[in-house]
Amino acid sequence: MNLEVHNIVGNPIIRHKYSCDPTALVYNNTVYLYTGHDEAPPGTEDYVMNDWLCFSSKDMTDWMEHPSPLRARDFSWASGDAYATKVIQRDGIFYWYVAVTHASVDGKAIGVAVSENPTGPFNDVRGSALITHDMLPFNSNEKANLDPGILIDDDGQAFIFWGNGTCYYAKLKDNMMELDSDIKKINLPGFEEGIHIHKRGEWYYLSYGFGMPEKVAYAMSKSISGPWEFRGILNELAGNCQTNRPCIIEFNGRSYFIYHNGALKNGGSHRRSVCIDYLYYNADGTMKRVLMTSEGVATIACPKE
């Protein structure tokens, strides 16, 4: 199969399609970028999202597009809507956590698909949702189950974070496909949605959409269970777009902040585009405010195989 490579200098990094809600995985000297796919035609101000996209790069500017490895309706229990996701690898298996609309339970739900390859195909081996609205502590918000984020801690314990309006978290079993604790809440100032969790050294970081229109803010803790200390704004309003969803990765000795805006022609809140800029840390572990640029990031030398 011939895969098309897009050499993009500057932001947005994907320009032949609208892309949104980025998540990324570093595996075998390669960055795998997974995005949502906005398909609303110009003039339609509503979310039209049916599948997710997958790209890979060894240098952060040459992005190879892979065939769409997953669609919302690949989950037999879902009625559609390909919202934000998270992909993580454990013991050579790739787990893709998604938010979709449930076909028979009111509200949104979180599912998980599995593959032996980072580019898929992915399959819903559970055959049912991991989290449904009726599992939550009382919440009248039908969008409460959005935007999953996953962390596997240093001791091997996995956690899932998610939410819209309220941030939730729970432990995952070793099989990565079942909850292993009660669902708990975290109080985060201005929390809207779009959570990303990562760990660096002794610090845990929760980054998320803050307010509406969404900036990105973050909190820090030395324990996965908190208390979480709010550390302020990480990223200002992205251009021409009401929402944002951060993703933070380390690759070849540098930190990257991945997000979306509405910068392409006819773009906007329902026709978004993924961008990448550099992320820097202060000596005390706090993160410096991200400088969004049109130049984006530079090509890095391809690592030796």
Image (cartoon, rainbow, N blue to C red):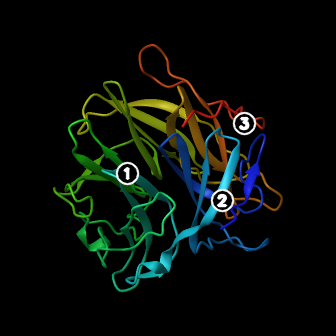
With 49 as the anchor, is 133 left or right in this view? left
Which residue is tagged 3?
296
* Direction right: furthest residue: 265
Residue at the (39%, 52%) spot, across then down? 88
- Do the CB atoms of the residues marked 2 and 3 lie less than 8 Å apart? no
- Do the CB atoms of the residues marked 1 and 3 lie less than 8 Å apart? no
User: Is label 1 or label 3 in front?
Assistant: 1
* Residue type for callout 3: Gly
- Do the CB atoms of the residues marked 1 and 2 lie less than 8 Å apart? no
In the displayed structure, 156 sits above or below 279; it is below
Label 3: how many Cα within 10 Å (few below 14, some 14–19, many 20+): many
* Residue 215 placement (x, y as % from top left): 58, 42
Element type where label 1 sits in the image = strand
Element type where label 3 sits in the image = loop
Query: Which of the two labelled residues, at mark 1 and mark 3, occupies the earlier sequence position?
Result: 1
Numbered tag placed on residue 89 in the rendering:
1
Residue at the (64%, 50%) spot, across then down? 260
* Residue type for callout 2: Glu
Numbered tag placed on residue 65 in the rendering:
2
Q: CA distance from mark 1 to mark 2?
A: 20 Å
